[in-house]
Amino acid sequence: MRPLAFVDLETTGATATVDRITEIGIIEVDADGAVREWQQLVNPGVRIPPFIEQLTGISNEMVAAAPPFEQVAADTLRRLEGRLFIAHNARFDYSFLKNEFKRLGVTFRAPVLCTVKLSRTLFPEHKRHNLDSLIERHGLAAEARHRALADAQLIHQFWQKIHIERDGASIEAALQAQNARPSLPPQLDPAIVDDLPDGHGVYLFYGENALPLYVGKAKNLRQRVLSHFAADHSSAKEMALAQQVRRIDWIETAGEIGALLKEATLVKTLQPTANRLLRRNDEVCTWTLVDEGEGWLRPQLALASELDFGIRSACYGLFKNSKEASEVLRALAAEHRLCDALLGLEKTTPGKPCFGYQLKRCKGACIGAEPYAKHTMRLIGGLARLKLVSWPVNGPALIREGEEAHLIDGWRYLGTARSDEELQALLTGNRPAFDRDIYKLLAKHVGRLLAVGRTADKRFLTDLNAE
């Protein structure tokens, strides 16, 4: 029998790149059957949320005097090295330990076995395979649920039970099915399967040179990257990409917004050949309204790059060029019986009817047959569905996502900060050009914006983290 390690962790939350470990429980089973148990509280260095305190029974007071992970890292690694890493929902525990070691500059890698997947394979007739279901189904003895060593003991008991309830051939088949390696192109290092994280981020596929072939984003980097190499490729393009890949890099982010922003930035900057055709932003324009007096508001085309999208400004639509903008305005004129002359779409002599009036499409605002104010009301009504979200604050703002803060100013993405020093550097750096794709991404999250002003307090992020 190969050496085993039954592992359970308690943590401050569910995100391995952000949350931290509060307790470690490991049961070592040697090849000769000898068993050793180890439990260790860990000071996470951050506050444990009340919900987690209630769930696990581990309070902030309990971990206050406990060692940080860096002080127990060597002992933890010694207990895991050379053993099959067995846990319930194993990617969770494995990812947390991997990230804790990574913060210390240590690469942690181990073969992993998930008892959730093992239970599903051996007992497919049952719908539920969480630890509570296994306790009830197999008569496991639970002393203290949601404490690390107690839950590790339950996993160990389940392992012992299945060797009584199922024959060795069935168990071995289930283990081989779970440990089957994904099919990777021969030019890629198989170790990448263990290295890929399970969280949000961006991945880059490289071919023979230094420029990436493709940039993608993922909620689960490991699953998304490996899906590119599945046998059932959805398209010839996908298969061709997989055959060209020689190297894979990735950047982890705190959440989906960070992944989307990073993807958009990298695609525009690096212009990978396999990504969709990039949009040019230098000619992106929008309609604004100019007050000509007497209730007459005239549409005026403006380059998006020249606007601040401030609280008091109203902008309508984002168009790739002036031709597209004019086509949209002409369609609105026809739909709402607007005057081409007042819209600036047709040049006429003052007081003379526009061509649309002669066709009985215009209601005659051009010759005074309709008040300017009524014409303007229909214009604003027609433009309403195109109205852009105004920048809601004076100056820059940020969106918090885990330990990251995405800094934005006038819908321009300045960058992502993880510290007050990085935030300050972004505030004093160059302001990037307006980008249509970035606007569309960020406008969906306008309710999460927090104003920081032109100069942020040096402890702004620290103070927010403490709240």
Image (spheres, rainbow, N blue to C red):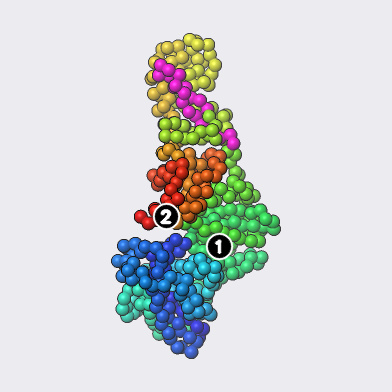
On the image, the x and y values in percent for residue 216 come to 56, 54
Range of residues picked out in magenta: 282-301
Q: Is residue 318 above or below residue 13?
A: above
- Which numbered disc, 1 or 2, marks the residue that appears first in the sequence? 1
Query: Overall secondary structure of the magenta stretch?
Result: strand
Residue type pointed to by label 1: Leu
Picture residue at 46% right of the left edge, 75% below the top:
72
Query: Residue 109's quadrant in the figure?
Result: bottom right
For residue 267, above or below residue 337: below
Closer to the camera, 70 or 33? 70
* Visible residue check, residue 80: no
Q: Please give the residue where the numbered disc 2 appears in the rendered image.
A: 462
Q: Residues within 10 Å of mark 2 (few under 14, many from 20)?
A: few
Element type at marker 2? Answer: helix
Q: Indicate the position of residue 377 as horizontal and vertical percent values.
A: 39, 23
283 falls in the magenta region: yes
Using the image, tell me which numbered label, if any, was put on residue 218: none
Q: Nearer the viewer, mark 1 or mark 2?
A: 2
Task: Tell me what residue is drawn at x 42 percent, y 12 percent.
Answer: 368
At mark 1, the secondary structure is: helix
To which residue does mark 1 refer?
A: 226
> Can you name the residue that lies furthest to the bottom here?
32
- Position of residue 297 relative to residue 97, above or below, is above
- Report how far apart the C-alphas of labels 1 and 2 lie in the structure: 37 Å
The amino acid at mark 2 is Thr
